[in-house]
Amino acid sequence: SYIPGIKIKSELKGDPYSTMSGTSIACAFIAAVCAIILEKTPELTAADLKSVLCLSTMSLGENKFSQGSGLFVFDKIMK
């Protein structure tokens, strides 16, 4: 599974609230999500954390090479 990141809103120097795509922008977002998850449940292993991330997605109706695991739904981890 991977999270490619498409049209993620981000602040950019000189152009606030632009959108970016790619694993580089998705990485920062998912790293922050991982920190929130681990703060809530610090006993998780890396494999557990990956499972939580993958189970917190929603299919976009594309193949996995186009959408990765799908759209990440933050609300799913906050339950």
Image (cartoon, rainbow, N blue to C red):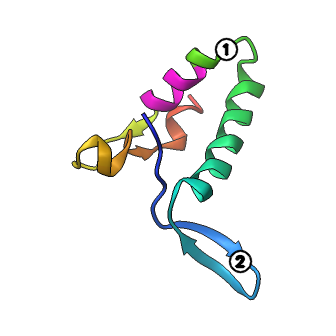
Which amino acid, mark 2?
Leu
Residue 75 x, y percent position in the rendering: 53, 40
Q: CA distance from mark 2 to mark 1?
A: 33 Å
Which residue is found at the position 54% from the left and 25% from the top? Answer: 50
Residue closer to the observer: 27 or 74: 27
Q: Mainly helix, strand or loop, the magenta region?
A: helix
Q: What residue would you read off at disc 1?
A: 44
Does 44 sit left or right of 54 as displayed? right
Does 9 sit left or right of 31 as displayed? left
- The question of residue 51 being in magenta is answered with yes
- Looking at the rendered structure, the secondary structure element under dot 2 is strand
Where is the N terminus found, in terms of image quarters? top left
Where is the C terminus found, in terms of image quarters? top right
- Looking at the rendered structure, the secondary structure element under dot 1 is loop
Residue closer to the observer: 10 or 25: 25
Residue 25: which disc?
Answer: none
Which residue is found at the position 62% from the left and 43% from the top? Answer: 30
Q: What residue would you read off at disc 2?
A: 12
Q: Is residue 76 above or below residue 3?
A: above
- The question of residue 44 being in magenta is answered with no
Q: Earlier in the sequence, mark 2 or mark 1?
A: 2
- Location of residue 57 (image quadrant): top left
Which amino acid, mark 1?
Leu
Segment colored magenta: 49-55
Which residue is found at the position 38% from the left and 38% from the top? Answer: 69
- Point out the residue furthest to the bottom here: 14
Residue closer to the observer: 30 or 64: 64
